[in-house]
Amino acid sequence: MTNLIVVAPFLVLGPYVAEEHLGGAPAWSAIGIAYAVGGLAGGFVAVRRKPSRPVGAALAVFLLMTPLPALLAVPATLWLLMPAAFLAGLEVVIYNVLQTSTIQRHVPDRLIARTSSVVTLGSLAAAPLGMGLAGPAAQVFGTGTGLAASTVLAILITVTALLVPSVWQIQDEQAEPGRTRSDRRRLQSLPLGIGQLMATDHPLHDP
């Protein structure tokens, strides 16, 4: 979902905004550098901070991505866009670390590969879809409107997800030997239906 509604529009429409309003390639390079530096900082933060509610924390951190498309929609000055790009890069790394570590800790070993493949497939499919839609949407509604809509959708979806009780049921605690809780109960606690999808040992197949 991140790739579809925020990352793809940012990657497609950001260079256009930089070319039309910010001075072209140097401005976009500065934004890209700030994004990369934010990613490096996100790695340091993720190593040192281990939230007790990792799924809720990952969703909350996603809100750090929203200032960038919002400011590009204006468009704001480069000196405001660079800190926003830094926050976006920070979010990407922290979110990915929390997502991956949560799967490793809370999904039974025999289902980790299956769960990871479903999550990865969704991310990879969403990116080109978002890129394909961003250009036509901007042409019809305008670049600023498209980026603003991206921001609003990201906030609404994130806030809605944070209201799901199962998001807060997963606690980041040391795994006990023998996994005292049943595999099915752990899987059902995962948000957004992933647990229910993974709860069977049978291969996935078309209906």
Image (cartoon, rainbow, N blue to C red):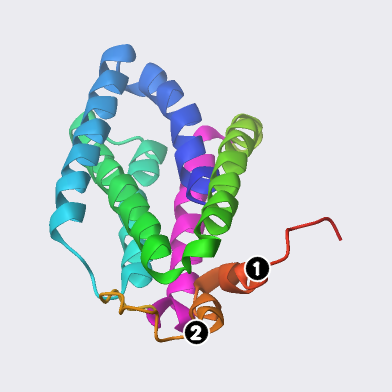
Q: Residues within 10 Å of mark 1 (few under 14, many from 20)?
A: some
N-terminal of the pair, mark 1 or mark 2, is 2
Vertical placement of 67 versus 140: above or below? Answer: below
The numbered disc on residue 55 is none
Residue drawn at x 43%, y 86% is 181
Vertical placement of 75 versus 57: above or below? Answer: above
Of badges 1 and 2, the one in the foreground is 2
> Which is nearer the eye, 64 or 149?
64
* Helix, strand or loop status at disc 2: loop
The answer to whether residue 165 is magenta is yes
Q: Write down the residue under mark 2.
A: 182
Percent from the top left, x then y, of residue 46? 21, 54
Quadrant location of residue 62?
Answer: bottom left
Residue drawn at x 29%, y 36% is 76
- The amino acid type found where label 2 is placed reads Ser
The span shown in magenta is 142-169
Q: Residue furthest right?
A: 207
Q: Write down the residue under mark 1.
A: 197
Percent from the top left, x then y, of residue 47? 17, 53
* Helix, strand or loop status at disc 1: helix
Quarter of the image that includes the C terminus: bottom right
- The amino acid type found where label 1 is placed reads Leu
